[in-house]
Image (cartoon, rainbow, N blue to C red):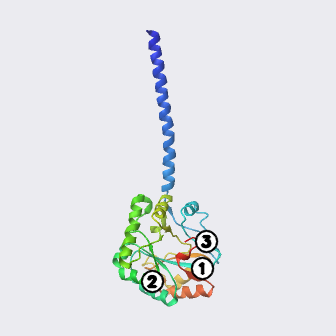
Amino acid sequence: MNVMVKGDNKMKRWTLALIALMISLSLLHVPKMNATASAQDRAFHFGFKRSQNGKLPSIDEEGFKDIIERNDAVFLGDPTQKEIYLTFDNGYENGYTKPILDTLKAKQVPAIFFITGHYVKDQPELVKRMVAEGHLIGNHSWSHPDMTTIPDSKIKEELERVRAAVAEVTGIQEMRFVRPPRGIFSDRSLKASREAGYRSIFWSAAYKDWDPNDQKGADYAYQKVLAQLHPGEVLLLHSVSKDNAQALGRIIDEARKQGYTFKALTELPGA
């Protein structure tokens, strides 16, 4: 009897030890999975080392270069060509898109306007005009959320609502380019956008132009943009800026004087 009890106890100890080992091994995998998910969801605010004296800007120091490249996102065009890709963010209308379009038409310059759901609902005639005059419409999401905080299904819904609304207004069914709201992104959010059929477009030249209450004059805008000219430039401007609207013609003229040409995003390498 005593032998049997001892045997039973020994068996119990082995069983408990085996269970503990299995639990420990299973727990070892949890941090790894969470770490992977965490890495994919890590949020970045797009930033870069600015161009000076014609030198190329860089994202080498920002810690997200591999994410940009892995998801075929763009912040710079062909760095060997004196080309500029002119992009505007249109979250809402502030009265300056019409004069911007007037200038682009007069100068025969293509651009892309990244618009939100609010914009397409509020300004359908301007959206129609953009398309009629040969410009591209880009997706800036329906409600301008932080894409890193919402699930993939919601990201795709945000993008599809804009595409469908633009198609209803203009008849253009295809939309190929997206700009993440506020320049916030993660590996996961860029991948979700790519799966939805979009190429994410960032920028290689910009300045603080988005605050309509902090405008410093057309000369300031002109100097800020010209100081950053570089080959393959993807220029971000906000259409709510009075300074941009007033300086745009001079910016185009001076860039062309320096040998630059303006191209549509559809002419990007690999587009």
Residue 271 percent location from the top left of the image: 54, 72
Residue 176 at x, y = what percent? 47, 71
Gap between marks 3 and 1 measured at Cα: 14 Å
Alpha carbons under labels 3 and 2: distance apart: 26 Å
Q: Kindly identify the residue that appears in the image at 48 percent across and 39 percent down.
A: 27
The mark that comes first in sequence, 3 or 2, is 3
Name the secondary structure under disc 1. strand
* Mark 1 crowdedness (10 Å alpha carbons): few <14, some 14-19, many ≥20: many
Q: Residue furthest top?
A: 1
Q: Residue at x 39, y 67 (%)?
A: 160
Q: Residue at x 57, y 79 (%)?
A: 84
| Residue identifier under label 1 | 83
| Among the 4 quarters of the image, the one containing residue 83 | bottom right
The reply to whether dot 3 and dot 1 touch (C-beta < 8 Å) is no
Residue 248 visible (yes or no): yes
> What x and y, as percent, mark residue 122?
34, 77
Q: Name the residue furthest bottom.
A: 106
Which amino acid, by three-letter code, is at mark 2?
A: Lys
Query: What residue sits right under mark 2 in the picture?
Result: 242
* Residue carrying label 3: 57
Compared with residue 47, is residue 263 higher up or lower down, i.e. above or below?
Answer: below
